[in-house]
Image: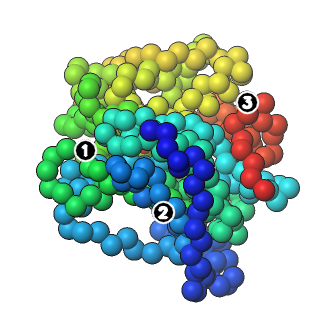
């Protein structure tokens, strides 16, 4: 929905007590994932009568919500995840933020929420980084994880699209997503639960998808695995994706398969980037269907040489072991493979400004 928001100005609210250099340095030295936050946040409101308005960049603080706010009852909430990097020349860079802005609006469409102009999505992130640029960690593999999200805050218990929303961006210094730091992760194939059915919200980045993944994810952890992998909801046969990552299979003949976008899988921006990079390496990347039986057979015969998961938070993570009810197998050596390592190195070098960006993926800020 185009409106005056294209030219919106961010009102600055002074922070009464930003973190000291010592506190910030201690956080940046050991950021972990998702537990530490920067000083500021951006907030923009939407109302049916006014469109996007009241854009602010100010102190990170709790958001008061009326108990009847629609999001608390019917889960009208969507989010994005992208990272800011400190480049060797000192500049700040984002990786494909336009793609996140587009996907955010695709998610908004599916959840009957208003669109946010793409330039406003990016301007909001830039406004936050202008305040919190000093929070970008510089260590190997570290970055500032940005979390734009939108939720319905109309006070109304009727079931229909809300008439009021708030868009917020927060930022969290991030290191490795997987705590174990193991060279490869293990994944559990869920046979009792599915993530998304045809016609559902699987392709949208909405909080509800993650809520329903928590029980199967907990089941994986309980059994000693790092992540859950979901099969399709209809035949319980085709590999779809992990709870928060897409998946790739690398074969001994130079072929690579990644599950096709059927509407039940999140169209990952890392996935899309890796398809391009792998093709440039001369690999034959197919977006297609791959069954769990074939996965086991190919791993056991040695035809499948590598497998990796990918996403903004997880970057590129080798998958070593796969198990489920009645199956348990190892892929290749069970550790990181050569192609996985190469493509991860290329992607992260582009993101971090250590390799030429020939795709126009990197957006440099001042
Ligand atoms: N699939 C799911 C369910 C996710 O949550 C994510 C993470 O955002 C991805 C895939 C990977 O998407 P992207 O590469 O855009 O981060
Ligand atoms: C991301 O990679 O940005 C995600 O949203 C995945 C989530 C599991 C942290």
Q: Is residue 33 left or right of residue 363?
A: left
Quadrant in the rendering for residue 66: bottom left
Please tell me the numbered disc located at residue 22. none
In the image, residue 171 lies at what x, y percent? 55, 62
Q: Which residue is mark 3?
A: 359
Please state which of residues 66 and 60 is positioned toward the viewer in this rendering. 66
In the image, residue 206 lies at what x, y percent? 35, 45
Q: Secondary structure at mark 3?
A: loop
Determine whether 290 is above or below 26 in the image: above
In the image, residue 346 lies at what x, y percent? 72, 37
**CA distance for labels 2 and 3:** 35 Å
Neighbours of disc 3 within 10 Å: few (<14), some (14-19), many (20+)? few
Point 77% across, 36% down: residue = 357
Neighbours of disc 1 within 10 Å: few (<14), some (14-19), many (20+)? some
Q: Earlier in the sequence, mark 2 or mark 1?
A: 2
Q: Is residue 29 left or right of residue 73?
A: right
Q: Which residue is mark 1?
A: 161
In the image, residue 182 lies at what x, y percent? 53, 52
Q: Is mark 2 within 8 Å of ligand 2?
A: no
Q: How is the image coloured?
A: rainbow
Q: Is residue 314 visible?
A: no
Q: Earlier in the sequence, mark 2 or mark 3?
A: 2
Please state which of residues 209 and 111 is positioned toward the viewer in this rendering. 111
Q: Secondary structure at mark 2?
A: strand
Please tell me the numbered disc located at residue 54. 2
Quadrant in the rendering for residue 19: bottom right
């Amino acid at each position: 929905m185009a409106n005056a928001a294209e030219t919106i100005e961010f009102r600055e609210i002074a922070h009464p007590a930003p973190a000291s250099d010592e506190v910030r340095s201690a956080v940046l030295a050991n950021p972990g994932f998702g537990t530490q936050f920067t000083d500021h946040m951006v907030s923009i409101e939407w109302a049916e009568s006014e469109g996007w308005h009241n854009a602010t960049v100010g102190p990170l603080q709790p958001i008061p919500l009326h108990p009847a706010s629609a999001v608390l009852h019917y889960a009208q909430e969507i989010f994005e995840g992208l990272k800011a990097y400190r480049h060797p020349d000192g500049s700040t860079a984002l990786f494909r933020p336009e793609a996140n802005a587009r996907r955010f609006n695709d998610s908004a469409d599916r959840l009957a929420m208003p669109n946010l102009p793409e330039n406003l999505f990016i301007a909001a992130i830039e406004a936050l980084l202008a305040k919190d640029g000093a929070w970008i960690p510089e260590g190997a593999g570290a970055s500032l994880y940005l979390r734009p999200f939108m939720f319905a805050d109309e006070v109304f218990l009727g079931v229909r699209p809300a008439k009021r929303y708030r868009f917020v961006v927060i930022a969290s210094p991030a290191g490795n997503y997987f705590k174990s730091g193991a060279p490869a992760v293990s994944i559990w194939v869920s046979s009792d639960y599915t993530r998304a059915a045809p016609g559902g919200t699987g392709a949208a980045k909405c909080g509800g998808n993650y809520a329903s993944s928590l029980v199967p994810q907990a089941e994986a952890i309980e059994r000693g695995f790092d992540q859950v992998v979901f099969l399709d909801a209809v035949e319980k046969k085709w590999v779809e994706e992990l709870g928060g990552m897409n998946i790739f299979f690398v074969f001994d003949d130079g072929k690579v398969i990644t599950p096709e976008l059927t509407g039940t899988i999140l169209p990952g921006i890392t996935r899309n980037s890796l398809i391009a990079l792998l093709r440039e390496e001369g690999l034959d990347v197919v977006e297609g269907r791959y069954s769990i039986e074939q996965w086991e057979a190919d791993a056991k015969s040695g035809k499948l040489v590598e497998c990796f998961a990918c996403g903004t938070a997880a970057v590129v993570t080798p998958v070593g072991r796969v198990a489920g009810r009645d199956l348990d197998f190892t892929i290749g050596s069970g550790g990181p493979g050569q192609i996985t390592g190469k493509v991860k190195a290329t992607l992260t070098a582009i993101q971090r400004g250590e390799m030429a960006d020939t795709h126009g993926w990197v957006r440099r800020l001042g």
